[in-house]
Image (tube, rainbow, N blue to C red):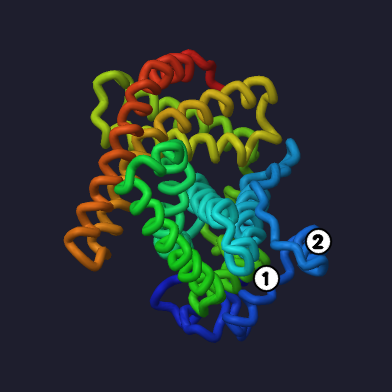
Amino acid sequence: MVRALSQNSKQQSPERSPGGARTSAVSLTAKRYRAGSPAARKATRRGKRPAWFKSAPVILNENATVDDAIFVVVSACRDHWQKNMAAVIDAQLPEGLHQVRVGLRRLRSALSAFKKYIPPAQRAWLNVEAKWLLTQLGPARDLDVFIQDLAEPLAERVSENAELAHLMRVARAAQTGAHQAAARTLKGARTGRFIGRLDAWLTGRGWHDGSDDSRDSKAVSAVDFAKRFLNRRLRNIRAEYDDIESLTAEARHELRIAVKKTRYGVEFFQAVLPAKRTHRLNAVLKDLQDNLGHLNDITVAKRTVDTLVNNASSGAERRQIAGGGNTVSAWHQKAAAEAAPKTIKLWRKLKKLPAF
């Protein structure tokens, strides 16, 4: 039996996996990201840059239990982020880094969904490691979003706005450094330990700790669990954020996170849920998440500009960067205001969708 993961256990030592097997953290990481998919290996042999990959559909059959679902869903989340590691380490692809982060967020969402059936110490350790890795990759992702989604719509103004042009040059230089740091993190010992222990935990089904909840996971239908879980999530969202027009910016950000987590849940169980209803719900959740994302874009822009200003070497450069940042923020404030009516329309549509 795979023993519980905990920060104070013997298994926390750098040399051991949760099952006690000795592992080499760095070599394990290298083996994982260099292997990749058959397509990635083929591309590498031809001298092409590694590709990035979106999450593959989660395959559950209608007779699956919650125990089956934990293994399949968490494995799919693991494969998603690890499959994209080469795109970050070898190619520094912004979309590869984004997919690594999406895979990690999906992993944390899965741990939350199945929290009743996973011992607290195990879930806590896995969450801590996933959150740590997300945090380490955050600066690179912020710069990617800032350059691709926030500043590039204003590209035509660069030639006529010296402050904006300077901001873009500084941001691109910072982006290169941040991606190099992200690659080092993914090749590092702590990431390697995380990979090895997560693999061992899944292989040994470490959540089988002999408790009543562990036994229930083998008896409860994944279909029944999915319907109860998603209906509860939807009820909570509708109740907590009912009056969307009066929500503060902070509350709308929290709503976006709740919508994103619910969408992940739908994707985890879509194979065993009614197809038309699932597709309709997922489409509304995606559009709502995208529209609410404008507010997050503004937050990313402010955080990124503040960091670049603080790292500037002179007062004159700080003023230039801040001036360019004001131009970017004003443009996206306008975009967020223009998106508000559609956000309200999508929210009302979500409230009317039937339960599973």
- Image quadrant where one finds the N terminus: bottom right
Residue at label 2? 38
Q: In the image, is residue 49 above or below residue 3?
A: above
Left or right: 90 with respect to 339?
A: right
Residue 107 appears in the picture as rendered: no
Q: Which residue is drawn at 23% across and 61% down?
A: 310
Q: Camera-side residue: 293 or 214?
A: 293
* Residue 269 point in image, percent of width and height: 63, 37
Q: How far apart are marks 1 and 2 (CA)?
A: 13 Å
- Image quadrant where one finds the C terminus: top right
Q: Which amino acid does label 2 sit on?
A: Pro
Q: At numbered mark 1, what does the secondary structure look like: helix, strand or loop?
A: helix
* Residue 109 point in image, percent of width and height: 49, 47
* Residue 264 point in image, percent of width and height: 54, 40
Q: Badge 1: few (under 14), some or many (20 or more) residues near its Cα, within 10 Å? A: some
Residue 246 appears in the picture as rendered: yes
Q: Which amino acid does label 1 sit on?
A: Arg
Q: At numbered mark 2, what does the secondary structure look like: helix, strand or loop?
A: helix
Mark identifier at residue 263: none
Q: Which of marks 1 and 2 is in front?
A: 2
Q: Badge 2: few (under 14), some or many (20 or more) residues near its Cα, within 10 Å? A: few
Q: In the image, is residue 8 above or below residue 294?
A: below
Mark 1 and mark 2 lie on one chain; the one further toward the N terminus is 1
Q: Which residue is drawn at 58% across and 48% down?
A: 216
Q: In the image, is residue 11 above or below residue 117?
A: below
Q: In the image, is residue 5 above or below residue 266?
A: below
Q: Camera-side residue: 304 or 159?
A: 159
Left or right: 352 with respect to 72?
A: left
Left or right: 255 with respect to 39?
A: left
Residue at label 1? 32
